[in-house]
Image (cartoon, grey):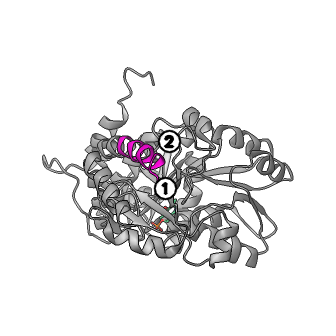
Amino acid sequence: MSNITRPQLGTLSVWAGEDEYLLQGATQVPVVHSVSFGYSDMDQWLRVALGQEAGHIYSRNTNPTVHAFEEKVRLLEGAAAATSAATGMGIISSALYTFLSPGDRVVSVKDTYGGTNKIFTEFLPRLQIEVALCDTTDHAEIEAEVAKGCNVLYLESPTNPTVKVTDLARLAKAGHAVGAIVIVDNTFATPINQNPLQLGADLVLHSATKYLGGHADALGGVVCGSKELIEQIYHYREINGATLHPMAAYLLLRGMKTLHLRIKQQNESALKIAQFLESHPKIERVFYPGLESHQNHDIAKKQMRGFGGMLSFMLRENSLDAVRRFLPRLRYAHAAANLGAVETIVGPPATTSHVECTAEERQAMGIPESLIRYSTGIEDTEDLIADLEQALAGV
Ligand SMILES: *Cc1c(COP(=O)(O)O)cnc(C)c1O
């Protein structure tokens, strides 16, 4: 499709995926709570059941509201197909277990989301699946591990909590050279800032719980890619049963209508906040891909349209105690284990993404005790900066 006829991302956020399900002039997609769908025509029932005709049979498999949500994400990622799950972890585990069997090998990075990391370190080895976890920004090491052969190359960019960025086009090429399926967790960037499929990935997935929904009121996961790959993940998820609930699908769908506006605001605010923090005497270090001081700024500039709403920073006083004094002083930030919402959310990795690790393990992973993860909300930038300023004055 040419650029003239293909709607842009904002228009897609609002309209995509909906028309098929607008009933009797309704302007909004209904929440279809029905578990099953009946057919008086046995032949039609059979055709739908066999996938020869569009339609729904049973809501563990497919459901109209859930399908509308999948369609919206699919169109935003520019993919041929999409399927969903009850949570981000539901779709990540479905994707990994679909393509990995005993004797297989997967290459990934050390900085994946905590739950994903648990699959790599705890569950896959139990099935005799070899896992090689590389330094997240050491592209040569990742390429060398991939060249030894692997079935899946699993990437995430930017990562949690120090927002490292990996060169997705470069690594997708390395993965394809050995016939691996290249999967990218695009939760932090969102389809507004980055489209991994256009950079060469085979599958892009999201914890829709975060930015896609954007209101911290519904859990969900979604994966997009070719029809052939998505059908296999769909089949696994359909049988394992981690299905997205229609009510959650509706909340995510509604949240996504403002995705482009939220991300635009969050991109702008996060950059200004990162710059403000970087020049503040009580701040030791700021991690944000939009800063020139960021180790992967050049890669981020090349593959992202915006640098996202996630940043992290270290207080000069490097102790959990300093964090303990700082966080409660913030007026416009929930201290919570979540991200990507309209409200600003803060938390130390010690109690959020890396709560399972010991202080020594966090140190080894390059996560200082005074690191604070900051998920920029959609509040006015000036208010967020003033809030940080007064909170820092008190530590
Ligand atoms: C939250 C998160 C997940 C897991 O998503 P859930 O919806 O909580 O299961 C996966 N990847 C990233 C990057 C996340 O932030």
Q: Nearer the viewer, residue 120 or 110?
A: 110
Give x and y (percent) for residue 240. Answer: 53, 74
Establish if 186 lies above or below 79: below
CA distance separating discs 2 and 1:
41 Å
Q: Is residue 55 above or below residue 267?
A: below
- Mark 2 residue element: loop
Outermost right residue: 148
**What mark, if any, has residue 192 been given in the picture?**
none
* Residue 146 located left or right of residue 237: right
Please indicate whether residue 56 sits to the left or right of residue 295 in the image.
left
Q: Quadrant for residue 324, please give it.
A: bottom left
Write down the region rendered in magenta. 268-281
Q: Is mark 1 within 8 Å of ligand 1?
A: no
Q: Position of residue 177 (x, y in %)?
A: 79, 41
Give the mark nearest the N terminus, 2 or 1: 2
**In the orientation shown, which residue stands out farthest toward the left?**
25
- Tell me which residue sits at (69%, 49%) in the image: 137
From the image, tell me which residue sits under label 1: 283
Q: Residue at x 44, y 43 (%)?
A: 275
* Amino acid type, callout 2: Ala
Whether residue 251 sits left or right of residue 152 in the image: it is left
Helix, strand or loop under label 1: strand
Q: Position of residue 140 (x, y in %)?
A: 80, 45
Which label number is shown at residue 79?
A: 2
Q: Quadrant of residue 33?
A: bottom left
Q: Dividing the image into 4 quarters, which one contains the C terminus? A: bottom left
Q: Main secondary structure of the magenta part?
A: helix
> Is residue 270 inside the magenta stretch?
yes
Q: Nearer the viewer, residue 114 or 257?
A: 114
